[in-house]
Image: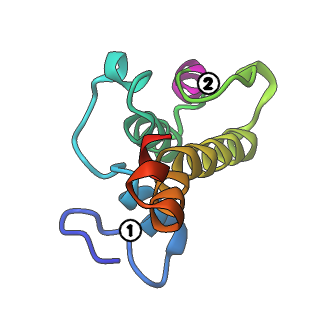
């Protein structure tokens, strides 16, 4: 996936493409909005990890998932973010599309 202004996203770097799809390459710093916006929260944590700011990433992680970040290293935080994005994507995007395809408008209302 090529995204202008995001040099690390592309077919040679699928994780960067995933983060880009989650809005991570925008110039967004609204951490207060991150609790209600999981793609934004994931992007802010990604930026903190890329900047080497582990403490900042740890402070932001509870906005995205319920794990205690105190003992997580960079890999642990990245795993928590990927898992949370996968679960939220399934709940917010995949499941409604599936039910809409299977049951039509009644499946979307349910």
Image coords of residue 89 (percent x, y)? 52, 50
Q: What element carries label 1?
A: loop
The residue lying furthest to the left in this view is: 4
Main secondary structure along the magenta-highlighted residues: helix
Question: Which segment did they paint magenta?
Answer: 55-62
What whole-number distance in Å separates the C-alpha atoms at marks 2 and 1? 23 Å
Q: Which mark is residue 58?
A: 2
The residue lying furthest to the bottom in this view is: 12
Q: Is residue 87 shown left or right of residue 56?
A: right
* Image quadrant in which you'd find residue 2: bottom left
Q: Residue 106 carries which label?
A: none
Q: Which mark is residue 8?
A: 1
Image coords of residue 10 (percent x, y)? 39, 78
Mark 1, residues whose alpha carbon is within 10 Å: few (<14), some, or many (≥20)? some
* Image quadrant in which you'd find residue 5: bottom left
Q: Nearer the viewer, residue 85 or 74?
A: 85
Residue at image position (75%, 36%) is 73
């Amino acid at each position: 996936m090529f995204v202008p202004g995001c040099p690390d996203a592309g077919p040679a770097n699928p994780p960067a493409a995933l983060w880009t799809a989650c809005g991570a390459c925008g110039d967004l710093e609204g951490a207060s909005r991150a609790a209600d916006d999981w793609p934004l929260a994931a992007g802010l944590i990604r930026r903190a990890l890329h900047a080497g700011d582990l403490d900042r990433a740890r402070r932001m992680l509870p906005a995205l998932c319920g794990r205690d970040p105190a003992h997580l290293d960079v890999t642990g935080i990245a795993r928590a973010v990927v898992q949370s994005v996968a679960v939220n994507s399934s709940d917010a995007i995949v499941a409604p599309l599936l039910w809409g395809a299977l049951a039509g408008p009644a499946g979307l209302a349910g």
